[in-house]
Amino acid sequence: MRQFIPTAFTIGNLFCGFLALHYAFSGNYVPAAWLIFLGAVFDKMDGQLARVMGRDSMFGLQFDSIVDACTFGIVPAAIIYQAHLPTGWGLALAFVFLLCGAMRLARFNTLSLDGERGEFYMGLAIPTAAVCLTQYVVFVKAWPIPHATPLAVLLILVLSFLMVSRLNYDSVPNFRGISLSDRFKQLYFVTTVGLTIYDGIFFFPMILVYVFSGPLRWIFRLVHGAVTQHA
């Protein structure tokens, strides 16, 4: 029975994606977007539980990836297409997001099988990209902005690039850590949760901070390395 618990969360993730797709095709994009977020929570929990319970398996890895491709690839692409890009070129752009997400999952699996996963994620994780893309729909719905469609196009391209990039991203913060870096990550995480509970509209800007942390870290290290070299 215990070995089924992580799989149950993966199934919950898949159900969230399936239900989100239903809402998307009904034009109810806000509940669809929050279901993607709930799916991401399930996705994080199934991996954590599998490791804690010592239930990591090849089946679990492959099943999780297939579910992620559905919930965080196909469904967000459908949501953004339906909400902001209902044209031929919009369909192509939505597919770019799906393609890059699938490539990101394939690389993650390869690194996992080779035992090369490190402290950081290589490239933006597809659940994060999916949540960011769908929360944009929620944000625009609550706070209409000019040029929402061009901005959606830009967001798709940026997220797609970041998923297949080699930029480093932090995982969920370690709340036992006491370093300054750990404290900053903990503060960001708690602030994001608090603001989202207060008003969901804050979630999109807060997740954008995380999305751009990868490029900013790369720029900082590049500049710091150049300064150190010339010192």
Image: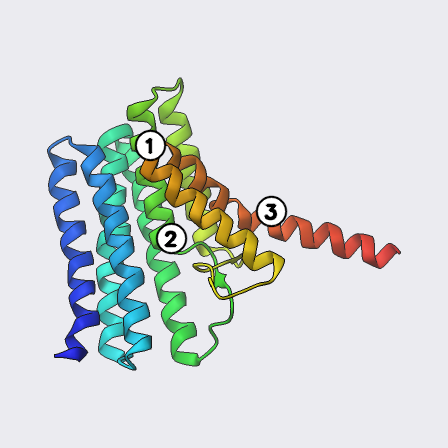
Q: Amino acid at mark 3?
A: Leu
* Residue occupied by mark 2: 100
Residue 145: x and y in percent read: 38, 19
Check disc 1: other Cα within 10 Å, few if <14, some if 14-19, many if 20+.
few
Question: For the view shown, which residue lies furthest in the right direction?
Answer: 231
Quadrant of the rendered structure where residue 203 is?
A: top left
* Residue occupied by mark 1: 199
Residue 112: x and y in percent read: 40, 75
Between 65 and 35, the one lying in front of the other is: 35
Check disc 3: other Cα within 10 Å, few if <14, some if 14-19, many if 20+.
some
Instruction: Count the marks.
Output: 3
Which quadrant holds the C terminus?
bottom right
Residue 94: x and y in percent read: 30, 41
Q: Is residue 147 above or below residue 123?
A: above
Quadrant of the rendered structure where residue 92 is?
A: top left
Left or right position of 52 against 107: left
Left or right position of 11 against 176: left
Q: Amino acid at mark 2?
A: Cys
Question: For the view shown, which residue lies furthest in the top direction?
Answer: 146
Q: Earlier in the sequence, mark 3 or mark 2?
A: 2
